[in-house]
Image (spheres, helix red, strand yellow):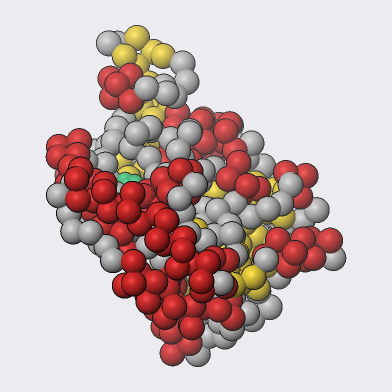
Amino acid sequence: MPAYAVIGGQWGDEGKGKVIDYLSERVTVVARFSGGNNAGHTVLNHKGEFKFHLMPSGAVWPQVLPVIGNGVVVDPNVLIEEIEDLKSRGLEVSKLQVSDRAHIIMPYHVALDQLEEEGRGTGALGTTGRGVGPAYVDKVARTGIRFGDMLDAEGLRNRIKQVLPHVNAIITNVHGGKAFDVPEIFQRCLEWREQLLPFIAPVEERVRGALSRGENVLLEGAQGTLLDLDHGTYPYVTSSSSSVGGACAGLGIGPMSVAGVFGIFKAYTTRVGAGPMPTELNDATGESIRQRAGEFGTTTGRPRRCGWFDGVAARYGVIVNDLTSGILTRLDILDGMNPVKVCVGYEVDGEPIDGFPAQINALEKCKPIYQDFAGWTKPTAGLTTWDDVPQEAKQYVQGLEKVIGCPLDVISTGPHRHETISRKMLIP
Ligand code: GDP
Ligand code: IMO
Ligand code: MG
């Protein structure tokens, strides 16, 4: 069964959007399965630049059916805005399908995200403030409201009446915030329903149909493995399963449907938000990477923390996703740097340790052990064939493959769709 997953291998922003747009030529469905509009996926092609937050990144291709699966939490305001923006740019978005089982990010989730962050003080997680965490909390607590609930207005009003008193008690008593009103929330839902009704669907059947006809389906990961609720640097993580395990649960397909799992890795490391990052560079080199790469968040505009490639963390990502291929992005950003360093192990108090620690206290004590690679003088920016890659850059790529234990079958050398080197055909 020909489904292929694209998973962030690090702390997000690896260039998943660019890669998904590139790979979508050969697929008929692109489906988001986790996260919400905390994601910001940049796509650049002949139609211009797009920053997708909810719309799947393959949406620019005319043959692609864009799907938002049950595992995604959706802020209807953001989705409506994104649909309108794409329409005004001449894109055909009427085919979009949003799962009737996807949970709604309500205005009170956004308020709670911000109140909770304020309450955490110096221990703030640095969330994107989009209500994603609180919406998943309600899903797990079984007090969420789903897109399918909008189909029955009376049922919806009763559901809001049932869940809102508890939400309000937390907002007012715990956080000292302002309560939400049942008629106001209900009215908002009716307005959303007016605009989104044509998109709400049982998406499982459409995805299954494509798979059984032998069509290729792309599963679009958001965030990254190190932000995964279980496998990431807990508690400095997002609230969903961003690794490949989330793809089946978040869309309603079985694991036997997944024929390939592609992990996206930036040629260095970035992180936005709080939490340990062993290879972070708080110096001129880190600043130089941030400036030359324009490392500022696609969703929040925050400066991203930058550092050398962390081979220990990336190898952990290879293992927990059972990656069949790695895809390396932003190699061009390292053009002209010398040396280029890779973290090949961690040490604590001068002693090397094995693996990627589960506890953040342990991870915070880890110091990177670096291997130096010679820089390259001839640029890689915009290259499209492996043969043209300078020898030193090839050695760097091969060094990364060795440390992470996975082949890097596609190399991205620029933000544009065509600035890509294919070393192996990933989707037949
Ligand atoms: P995502 O969240 O994983 O989709 O990544 P983002 O879109 O948030 O951030 C990746 C940034 O890198 C975007 O600005 C992309 O346009 C850009 N990008 C992706 N691949 C490359 C590449 O190979 N080279 C360069 N220079 N930029 C790239
Ligand atoms: P894409 O899909 C980078 C980070 C936030 C914060 C933590 C929790 O573009 O790679 P949340 O709002 O999810 O509760 O925040 O997760 N984060 C991301 N970092 N890229 C993302 O998405 C992210 N989505 C969430 O900065 O540290
Ligand atoms: Mg991003």
Q: Quadrant of residue 291?
A: bottom left
Q: Residue at x 52, y 61 (%)?
A: 146
Residue 4 in the image: x percent, y percent? 68, 54
Left or right of 100, for residue 207: right
Q: Is residue 111 left or right of residue 50?
A: left
Of 415 and 82, the residue lying toward us: 82
| Picture coordinates of residue 119, whole percent (x, y) | 17, 42
Residue 23 shows in the view: no
Between 7 and 290, the one nearer to me in the picture: 7
240 w.r.t. 311: above or below: below
Compared with 56, 265 (above or below) is above
At 52% from the left and 53% from the top, the residue drawn is: 34
- Quadrant in the picture for the C terminus: bottom right
The residue nearer to you, when weighing 163 against 328, is: 163
User: Is residue 123 among what the camera can see?
Assistant: yes
Q: Is residue 132 above or below residue 65?
A: above
Which residue is the extreme one toward the right? 213
